[in-house]
Amino acid sequence: MKTTITLLTFLIAAAPAMAADAIVNPLSPDAEVIAAGRKLYHSAGCIACHGNNARGAVGPDLTDDEWLRKPSDEMIFNTIRNGRTGTAMSGFSGDMTEEQTWQIITWLKDENAKRKAPK
């Protein structure tokens, strides 16, 4: 029992430090980055599965908040770069730079913000 409490105490204390190491998008969401991300999304062929505006087709909608886990920058980055096991999503690490991946993520987040905006 004491070992369990000690382990839990360690994990709770270490949680903020682990979160601080998370990968976050280094790019600012300015119009130029967003436009580059949209262009890359289309040229990389993402539209074949996720649709013209990333709201889903054969693949899931990438602009909503209905994910199994909170779509952190790190999770989205790793999915684009490495793909998702057990799905048709293949990785693009050999096809685009890390900066290009971040540009796509910036565009996706902008699309999400537009979707949530009051009409």
Image (spheres, grey):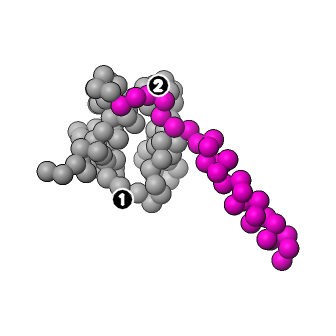
Local SS, label 1: loop
**Residue located farthest toward the left when viewing the structure as drawn:** 119
Q: CA distance from mark 2 to mark 1?
A: 26 Å
Residues 63 and 119: in front is 119
Q: Amino acid at mark 1?
A: Glu
Q: Amino acid at mark 2?
A: Glu
Above-or-below relation of 108 to 29: below
Residue 110: x, y in percent?
30, 39
Q: Residue at x 46, y 55 (%)?
A: 70
Q: Residue at x 50, y 27 (%)?
A: 98
Q: Which quarter of the picture shows residue 13?
A: bottom right
**Residue 81 seen in this snapshot:** yes
Q: Residue at x 22, y 48 (%)?
A: 117
Residues 25 and 38: in front is 25
Point out the stretch of residues depicted in magenta. 1-29
Please give the label number shown on residue 99: 2
Q: Which quarter of the picture shows residue 102?
A: top left
Residue 15: x, y in percent?
66, 54
What secondary structure do most residues of the magenta stretch adopt?
helix
Please give the label number shown on residue 81: none
Please give the label number shown on residue 66: 1
Residue 91: x, y in percent?
49, 37
Q: Which quarter of the picture shows residue 68?
A: bottom left
Seen in the image, is 85 located left or right of residue 110? right
